[in-house]
Image (cartoon, rainbow, N blue to C red):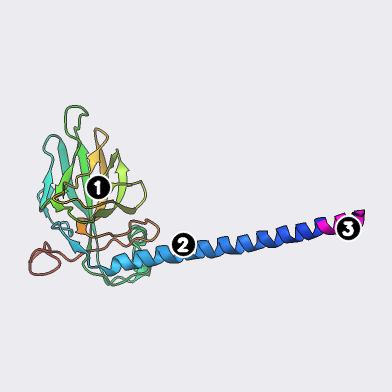
Amino acid sequence: MSTQEIGALIQSVNNMTGTVAGKMGQIDQRMDQAETEFDQFMVQARLENAIFRQSKNQYCNLTANSLDFFTKNSQYTIDVSLYRVINPGTPWSQRDSEEQEILTAMGMTGTQYFQPAIRVMRMAWSGYQSGIHSSYTMFPNPVGNASGMVTTASYAKLVSGSISEWWLYGVTTQWGLCGQHFSGQPGRYLHAHPRVGSDSGEVLFIWPAIVSGYVPLNKNSPKWGYWPSMYGENPYDAQPGS
């Protein structure tokens, strides 16, 4: 075989290699697109199923320094208070920077109207001693039923100290969606109680609850909302006057 023929053969192989690489790139691109479309379909399909709240008082009414229908650990000091209320009806441009930050973290950028008003709560704890006290803080009642898939979540921001798990799983010093999923087992139940990891601290939170079903927990595309309740005469079982 002449040098010219060898060169032509090498060029042919190189051309074929480039063609194959191009085709593989196109296949990879289509696979990535298909995976993205499937993920989007799964998110939407899950949300098209009915989501029912098992726990009461997602609205976060208070009696003294405790949330109604929540059981609080009495082994150390836990105080819950109303931090602020974000009311519907205010134009976005007239909301202060903190309201805009919170609503953006909730996927509500630019929103003027919503229901119900958003009660931002503060939980502060002190006097916790590791190895002496149980680290759980408080959990909603009634106890969650996990015979099927359940989601427990909230929107929250850590101010100081350390706390995590359940509806505060993944909390950071920036406002964002927190929570966990639990797959069902016959007869399983949940005490959805975040646990502290420091002697004292403070956390802000919104809309803590346990719901039946799978709610995606993507901080960048939050889907957690104010869910219809199985209790009371209306979906807002624990609003004032209900």
- Disc ID at residue 5: 3
In the rendered image, the quadrant that contains the C terminus is bottom left
The image position of residue 47, as x and y in percent, is: 29, 66
Residue sitting nearer the eye, 184 or 59: 184
Label whose residue precedes the other's in the sequence (3 or 2):
3
Visible residue check, residue 108: no
Distance from the alpha carbon under mark 3 to that under mark 1:
70 Å
Q: Of helix, strand and loop, which one carries label 3? A: helix
Q: Judge depth for marks 3 and 1 and give the one in front.
A: 3
By secondary structure, the bulk of the magenta-drawn segment is best described as: helix
Q: Which of marks 3 and 1 is nearer the N terminus?
A: 3
Q: Against 157, is 234 above or below?
A: below
- 10 Å crowding of disc 2: few (<14), some (14-19), many (20+): few
How far from the left and from the top, in percent, is residue 1? 89, 54
Q: What stretch is highlighted in magenta?
A: 2-9
Query: What residue is at 22 percent from the left and 49 percent from the top?
Result: 122
Question: Are discs 2 and 1 less than 8 Å apart at CB?
Answer: no
Figure label count:
3
Q: Where is residue 117 in the image (x, y as percent from the top left)?
A: 22, 65
Q: Mark 1 points at which residue?
A: 166
Q: What residue type is labelled 1?
A: Trp
Q: Is mark 2 on a helix, strand or loop?
A: helix
Identify which residue, 133 or 33, lies in the foreground: 33
Q: Name the residue under label 2.
A: 35
Q: Which amino acid does label 2 sit on?
A: Glu
Which is closer to the viewer, label 2 or label 1?
A: 2
Helix, strand or loop at mark 1: helix
Does the magenta segment cover residue 26? no
Is label 3 in contact with label 1 (beta carbons under 8 Å)?
A: no
Between the C-alphas of marks 2 and 1, the distance is 29 Å
x, y percent for residue 190: 17, 48
Give residue 90's quadrant in the image.
bottom left
